[in-house]
Amino acid sequence: MTRFLNRALGPFALVSLAVTIWLGLWVTPPDEVQGDIVRLLYVHPALATVALYEAFALAALASALYLWPRTRSEKWDLLAASAVEVGVVFLTLTLITGSLWGRPAWGVWWTWDARLTTTALLDILFIGYLALRRVPADPPVRAKRCAVLALLSTLDIPIVHFSVQWWNGLHQGASVTVGFHFLIHGSMLWTFLLSMVAFSATFVWMVRERYRIAVRDEMHGVETLEVALAARRAEGAS
Amino acid sequence: MLHDALLVAGKDLRIELRSRVLLWQVLPFGILALVLFALALGPSEAVLRRGAPGLFWLALLLAAVLAIARSAGIESAEGTRASVRLLGLDPGGVFLGKSCALLVELSALGLVLDLGLLVLFHVDAARLALALPLALLAVVALAAVGTIYGALVAGTDVAGTLLPLLVLPALSPVLIAGERGTASVLAGGGPGRWAVLLAVMAVVYVAVGIVLYGPLEEAS
């Protein structure tokens, strides 16, 4: 069953993304006020949701599990790193699609709105995580440093989330749902919900693949080291 | 933990008093940054006064990066970490001690930069004095964040380039809240919710630092 789910995840993600694009571009109607620009509704919020509440939350959880002595395992470190890598891609795409939406809606590509600024800072914080990860160090040392940095960077997520309410900038607040009450209906609602599922599935698929590569990379590193040590020992013996 | 914190803070401050790195390197850099900002803005008093809060916090932040690197560098010296471990000091105490020492250093730096604002940016002295409690809250957060990030990069070959990349985005909320609060006080108002935000940040970062400094010490 697990094997089937693993195999089905990739095709499911791709198909659901394709259906989202089809519904978003051809089936759903244009908005009365925003016209065709509203079609970014099926991309931008989903990218942001995945990056903020799935990718970086997963990275924080995996980092906490690594730091907790009882659950410490290299797999949590690799999972956190994979989630951050994919999360940075999603958050950068969030900023790009937001900018594309902002130009026609607000008349500028970028404005120093609290939501935009805090999101850009979060992206830079996690790019810093990726930079720290590339600093040569023993794997346990690197893992501890990165886990601490991931938890520290996660502190910015509540600031991003509440920035709209705290600073009342240009970026609108919750405009699709209020609690469990939806403010959009019909094909727009279903396409919006599908976009959330599609991008989440894509995220899970990408993280799983990145994690598998990371595990193999670590194993390859250990094997290479063992081969090099064996060669040196053989040199010493001869 | 408090006893350990006092020991570590005393050690760091004694090293600073003997080496005078803050006095001869960090302080002149902060003043230089203020002068350069003033040069970039031009001689208009109104423009200088309006930009003063932001430039003060920017100068303090940039100079703080040097102070943080120095504070972390003390721990990276040959055998220092091993000695601290052998003493069996509580990691939370070490964090608090280093943060307190950094707090004292950055407060001194902030006071000198405040004088710079009076002289170079023509800011009202009485209103600037009213902004000092807000600045102290910001410096507590700054010292706590700086101590954690300093420990993060300590012992790496690229600490000099990595520290600004990691610590400046993390300190940006302090910069924003500090600037807005100071600007509000200088304009004749109160610091309002910016003081609350800075107080929350200070408490959160100190608490997080006490919890996370242990794993960081193990990693270095």
Image (cartoon, coloured by chain):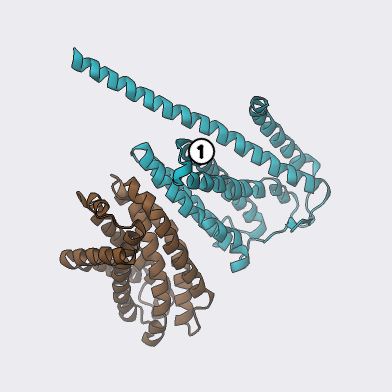
Q: Nearer the viewer, residue A223 or A205?
A: A223
Residue A96 is at least partly visible in this image: no
Tell me the colour chain B is drawn in.
Answer: brown
Q: In the figure, B33 relative to A65: above or below? A: below
Tell me where residue A25 appears, x and y as whole percent: 74, 41
Tell me which residue sits at (33%, 50%) in the image.
B217
Q: In the figure, B43 relative to B3: above or below? A: below
Tell me the colour chain A is drawn in.
Answer: cyan
Count of numbered labels shown in the rendering: 1
Q: The N terminus of chain B is located in which quarter?
A: bottom left
Tell me where residue A52 appears, x and y as whole percent: 58, 50
* Label 1: chain letter: A
Residue A65 is at least partly visible in this image: yes
Horizontal side of A105 relative to B81 (left or right) equals right
* Local crowd size for mark 1, using a 10 Å CA cut-off: few (<14), some (14–19), many (≥20): many
Tell me which residue sits at (33%, 22%) in the image.
A226
Residue B19 lies in quadrant: bottom left
Residue for badge 1: A79
Q: Residue at the left extreme?
A: B18
Tell me which residue sits at (71%, 35%) in the image.
A16
Q: Residue at the right extreme?
A: A186
Horizontal side of A213 relative to B39 (left or right) equals right
Q: Residue at the bottom extreme?
A: B126
Disc 1 secondary structure class: helix
Tell me where residue A233 appears, x and y as whole percent: 24, 18
Residue B100 lies in quadrant: bottom left
Residue B209 lies in quadrant: bottom left
Q: Disc 1 marks which amino acid?
A: Leu
Tell me where residue B190 appears, x and y as whole percent: 50, 82
Q: In the figure, B82 relative to A22: above or below? A: below
